[in-house]
Each structure stands twice: as structure tokens, then as C-alpha cells.
Image: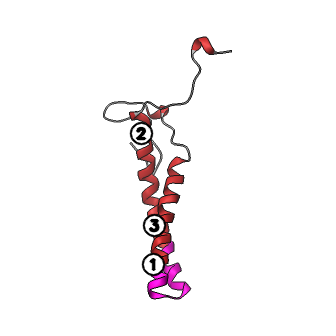
């Protein structure tokens, strides 16, 4: 499905499905930010109230975790949204031939 990290291939190598009809837009990024933000904020608050470490410990813990989780969730959420588009036959809105002005 992917040609590189998040770039789509032109078509499916197994069934020759054209991937040009799929467009996830900014959706994967939004879902990734919300999910990663909730996870990291919850963990950061738990660590702060339980251990009360200095600020540099928070930076050492959470910055790499944010980068790693964002990289993982971006690809997962993009593939999930593309699968949902295919399943529900979602696409760009188009006027029918008789409705065009």
C-alpha cells in the first residue's frame, strides 16, 4: 500500500486497484496529534504527581516518546482512513450529469 513512509503507491501490486481515488487529507495528522497528546499528557501528569522529577527528566522522557508515537500513529491512522474510504466508497463530491449548471 505504501511506497516509502506515508506516500501511496500508484496501484495495489496484488489486485491493481488504483489508489488515485483515495485522499486522506489532514485527517491522519489530526487523529495522530489527538491520540499521542492524550497518551503523553496522561503519562506526564502521572509521572509529575507521583515522582516530581526535574524539568529536564520530563524533556528527556516525553520528547522522544512524542516523536516515536507520532511516527507510528501517522502511518496507522492514514492506512485506517484509506481503508474506511474504500469500504464506504467515499470520494469527492461530484454533481450528476443532469445537475451540472
Asked if 18 appears above or below 67 in the picture, the reply is above
Dot 2 lies on which element? Answer: helix
Dot 3 lies on which element? Answer: helix
Of tags 2 and 1, the one toward the viewer is 1
Asked if 31 appears above or below 93 in the picture, the reply is below
Q: Nearer the viewer, residue 21 or 87?
A: 87
Which mark is first along the chain, 1 or 2? 1
- State which region is magenta: 47-63
Q: Residues within 10 Å of mark 3 (few under 14, many from 20)?
A: some
Q: Residue at x 48, y 46 (%)?
A: 7
- Residue 3 horizontal/vertical position (percent): 42, 45
Q: Split into 4 quadrants, where in the image is the C terminus?
A: top right
Q: Residue at x 51, y 42 (%)?
A: 24
Looking at the image, residue 55 sits to the left or right of residue 47; the answer is right
Alpha carbon of mark 2 to alpha carbon of mark 1: how far? 34 Å
- Residue 92 horizontal/vertical position (percent): 55, 30
Look at mark 1 in the image and give the residue it sits on: 46
Q: Residues within 10 Å of mark 1 (few under 14, many from 20)?
A: few
Q: Are marks 2 and 3 in contact (CB under 8 Å)?
A: no
Residue at the far left: name it: 14
Q: Main secondary structure of the magenta part?
A: helix
- Residue 71 horizontal/vertical position (percent): 46, 60
Look at mark 2 in the image and give the residue it sits on: 84
Residue 11 falls within the magenta-colored stretch: no
Alpha carbon of mark 3 to alpha carbon of mark 1: how far? 11 Å
Q: Residue at x 55, y 43 (%)?
A: 25
Look at mark 3 in the image and give the residue it sits on: 39
Asked if 55 appears above or below 94 in the picture, the reply is below
- Residue 14 horizontal/vertical position (percent): 30, 34
Instruction: Point out which mark residue 54 bears.
Output: none
Whether residue 11 is visible, yes or no, is: no
Amino acid at each position: 500500500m505504501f511506497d516509502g513512509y506515508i506516500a501511496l503507491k500508484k496501484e495495489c501490486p496484488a489486485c491493481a486497484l488504483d489508489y488515485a481515488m483515495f485522499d486522506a487529507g489532514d485527517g491522519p495528522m489530526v487523529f495522530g496529534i489527538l491520540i499521542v497528546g492524550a497518551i503523553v499528557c496522561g503519562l506526564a501528569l502521572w509521572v509529575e504527581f507521583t515522582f516530581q522529577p526535574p524539568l529536564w527528566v520530563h524533556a528527556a522522557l516525553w520528547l522522544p516518546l512524542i516523536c516515536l508515537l507520532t511516527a507510528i500513529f501517522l502511518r496507522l491512522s492514514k492506512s485506517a482512513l484509506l481503508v474506511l474510504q474504500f469500504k464506504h466508497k467515499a470520494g469527492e463530491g461530484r454533481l450528476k450529469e443532469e445537475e451540472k449548471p
